[in-house]
Image: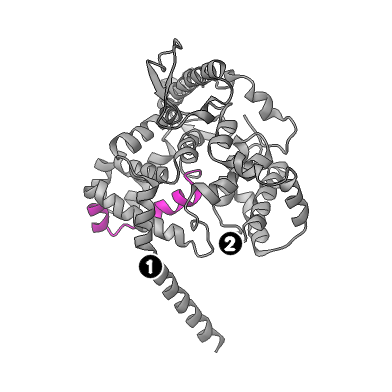
Amino acid sequence: MMYGSSGTQSKRDLAYEHQAQISILRPSIRARRANMTVKFQDLYGFVVEGNVDDVNVLNEVREKARQQGRVWWALEANKGANWYLATHASSVLKSSLKFSALVNAVTLKRLIKKGIPLNLRPKVWFSLSGAAKKKSTVPDSYYNDLISAVVDKDTAATKQIDHDLPRTFPGHPWLDTPEGHAALRRVLVAYSFRDSDVGYCQGLNYVAALLLLVMKTEEDAFWMLAVLLENVLFNDCYTNNLSGCHVDQRVFRDILTKKCPRIAAHLEALEFDVSLVCTEWFICLFSKSLPSETTLRVWDILFYEGANVLFNVALAIFKMNEEELLMAHQVGDVINIIQRTTHRLFDPDELLMVAFDKIGLMTTTTLSKQRKKQEPAVMAELDQRLRRLNSVNVDEQE
C-alpha cells in the first residue's frame, strides 16, 4: 500500500524497496467453493470487489508484474539505472539476459506496453514524460514557493477543490484522510495558480489523487500533473467550457464509425450518445472507470506515447463488448454493459491487446488533424449554448 508524502520517508517509500510487495490474493476455501463475491485491497489501497475468477485473474496479472519487474531490474543492473533515457522507441535493446521475456531483443516501447514495475514507475514516468525536464527549468524551490504564495488565497477554483476533496475516492485509507485531503489540495491549488487558463476542472481531482499514490513525493505529483496538462494531453481538454472534451467526443464518434461500424450503426439506431460513457473516461483518464492497476498500465503508455492511447483504449472497451452491445435494445443496457466490463477489467493485457493489436495505430498527429476539423462545429455549438443561456438569464431578470 503506497501513500503520497511531501518528501520525507513514508510507509509507501518503505514498501517500494521490495518487489515482494506484490502479494498473492488468497480467498477463503468457502469463498472459492461457492465462487462468492469477495472484497480485497489492491496494490494502491482501493477496495475491489470480484468473484474468485477475478481473483485468479489478478493473481496471474501480479505474477506477470513480478516477472516484468525482474526484466527491468536486470536491465538496470546491466545497462545502468537510467538506461531508458538513452533509448528511443525504435531502437532495439540487445541482451543476453536469461529471461523468457527477453528472447533475442526487445524495444523500450514493447517493455512499456508490458508494464513498468511498481517500484520503478515513479522515476520512469518522471523521466520519460518530460516532467523532470520541466522541473529543471525553474528554481528548486518553485513548488514550495508556489504553495506558500497561495496559502489562504480564496478563488472559485479553491472553493470547487474544497468541495471535491471529500468526494475523491471516498473510503481510501490515505486519500480520504485529513493528510490525504491536504496533500491533494496543495497539488490542485498550486496548479490552479500556475495555469489560470485551466485553473481547476472537476475530474482533475481523481487524476491528481492517483498521481499522488504513484509518485514518491507530492512535488513530483505536481510536476506530473503539469506535464500531463501542458504537454501530454491536447491543451484544450480542461478549459472552462470543456471545448476540448467536446471535440474529443466528436472525434471518437467518427473513429468508432470507421473502426467498429457495426457497433456505431447499432448505437446510432438506439440514439445512444457515446459521451454518456466517454466523457468521464477522457476527463478522468479512466481513473474512475478501470481498476487502478489497469488504469496505471494505460498511463504507462500515455506518458510515453501521448493522448492517442486514450482513444485506443476507449475503442477497445467497445470492441471487447461488440456481440453483447449488438444485442442491446435500450440505452440503459449499453451503459450497463460498458460499466460492468470496465469495473471488472482486472487484466490489463487483455485490454491493451485489443487496443493496440486489433484496433490499429492511431498517431497523435492524425488525431490532431481530426480535432482541427471538429473544432469549428464545437465552438459554434458552445457559442449558441452561451447565447441561449444569456437570453434565459435576461428574461429571468426582467
Coloring scheme of the render? one colour
- Give the Cα separation between the discs numbered 1 and 2: 20 Å
Circle 2 residue = 197
Q: Where the C terminus falls, by quadrant?
A: bottom right
Image quadrant in which you'd find residue 130: top right
Residue 139 horizontal/vertical position (percent): 72, 45
Q: Residue furthest bottom?
A: 398
What residue is drawn where x is 48% and y is 77%? 389
Disc 1 is placed on an element classified as helix
Which residue occupies the foreground of this view, 282 or 346? 282
Residue 369 horizontal/vertical position (percent): 36, 55
Q: Main secondary structure of the magenta part?
A: helix
Q: Is residue 344 magenta?
A: no
Q: Is residue 267 magenta?
A: yes
Q: Start and end of the magenta stretch?
A: 264-287
Which numbered circle lies on residue 324? none
What residue is drawn where x is 48% and y is 82%? 391
Q: Amino acid at mark 2?
A: Asp
Q: Sequence order check: which comes first, mark 1 or mark 2?
A: 2
Q: Amino acid at mark 1?
A: Pro
Residue 293 seen anywhere in this rendered image of the structure: yes
Residue 145 horizontal/vertical position (percent): 76, 50
Which residue occupies the foreground of this view, 373 or 137? 137
Circle 1 residue = 376
Q: Is residue 114 above or below residue 203?
A: above
Q: Crowdedness of circle 2 by 10 Å Cα count: few (<14), some, many (20+)? A: few
